[in-house]
Amino acid sequence: MLLSCRGSGTTPGKDGRLQVVTTLFPLYDFAKNVGGEKAQVRLLLPPGIEPHSFDPKPRDILTINEADLFMFTGSFMEPWAVNLIKGIRRNKLVVVDSSNGVTFLDEKPVAEGAERERGHDHAPSGRAAIDPHIWLDLGNAEQMVDNILAGFILRDPQNRNIYEGNAETYKTKLRELDRQFKDGLGACETRLFVHGGHFAFNYLAHRYNLTYESVYGFSPNAEPTPRHLADIIATMRRHNTRYVFYEELIQPRVAETIANETGAKLLPLNGGHNVTKEELSKGVSFIALLEQDLRSLRTGLQCR
């Protein structure tokens, strides 16, 4: 979805740069790379905040209202954004739904007796829900960059060649990262990885032919059932799994419990939703986060 009122194509605002607001960190980094020096990009999600429980404040709505472009992940990840943009009245705002044209995956069907987290239930009970973590399939990430590029061109067509060049340069880096994952995870002792966090790595596992088990559903706000936790521990023992992964921005309490029960070691894994204030100030990139994930996965899966 690419939405704009009749103000598109007008001169960019403050200091000649487009004012861009993005929801999650991957979009922030994609937009910075495509916009380059022609854009000032702002991350709406405060650094260090877990995104699934994010609720925009009045000042956030004002920030969006004052922007030239607003970019969100999609209706499954940010249902609040769909309702919010209906109330935006500023004619020049271009809205980019970065999920347009991506390949969606379902979450695994909800097991009998399992607890589905509140607030991000995208399907009736007992049926699969759409997985919103689309950026962890690097093919999807390229499509998201193309959607962002289309937004820049719609808002500022006179600099089309610059945006197209920036986007192609960045997509080349994504393709190289994809190749590193395929090569790096091609020959491993195990293809099972257990994640003591929420269900974020389905797309990555699907793309690289891995078997993925997570403790939580889409959101880490709901506790896993004792039955589900026992099943995961049993699976790890059956497969002699030596590592359990924990996620960024969340205390690894459950991952530590699993490690204590199985004798496994802990390894970090970053879904890229958000970064800490320190990481943001140092200019950490989406690609750097995934390179760290690849190193952790190669260790955890005992890859050659």
Image: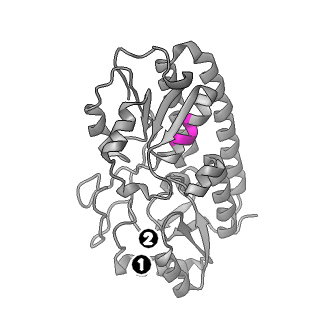
Out of 200 and 181, give the one closest to the viewer: 200
Q: Residue at x 43, y 41 (%)?
A: 73
Out of 37 and 169, give the one closest to the viewer: 37
Work out whether residue 142 can be spotted.
Answer: no
Residue density around tag 2, few if under 14, some if 14–19, many if 20 or more, within 10 Å: many
Q: Marks 1 and 2: CB-CB under 8 Å?
A: yes
- Does the segment drawn in magenta span residue 105? no
Work out whether residue 35 can be spotted.
Answer: yes
- Point out the stretch of residues depicted in magenta: 27-31
Along the polypeptide, which appears first: circle 1 or circle 2? 2
- Does the segment drawn in magenta span residue 29? yes
> Looking at the rendered structure, which numbered label has been put on residue 295?
none
| In this rendering, position of residue 184 left or right of residue 208 | right
Q: Residue at x 44, y 64 (%)?
A: 198
Out of 240 and 247, give the one closest to the viewer: 247
- Asked which secondary structure carries label 2, the reply is loop
| In this rendering, position of residue 280 left or right of residue 148 | right
Q: Which amino acid type corresponds to the residue marked 1 in the rendered image?
A: Leu
On the image, the x and y values in percent for residue 146 come to 53, 29
| In this rendering, position of residue 218 left or right of residue 122 | right
Tell me the quarter of the image containing the C terminus.
bottom right
On the image, the x and y values in percent for residue 226 come to 36, 81
Instruction: Indicate whether 122 appears above or below 215.
Output: above
On the image, the x and y values in percent for residue 253 come to 48, 78
- Asked which secondary structure carries label 1, the reply is helix
Residue density around tag 1, few if under 14, some if 14–19, many if 20 or more, within 10 Å: some
Magenta: predominant secondary structure element?
helix
Identify residue for label 1: 229
Instruction: Indicate whether 24 appears above or below 70.
Output: below
Identify residue for label 2: 215
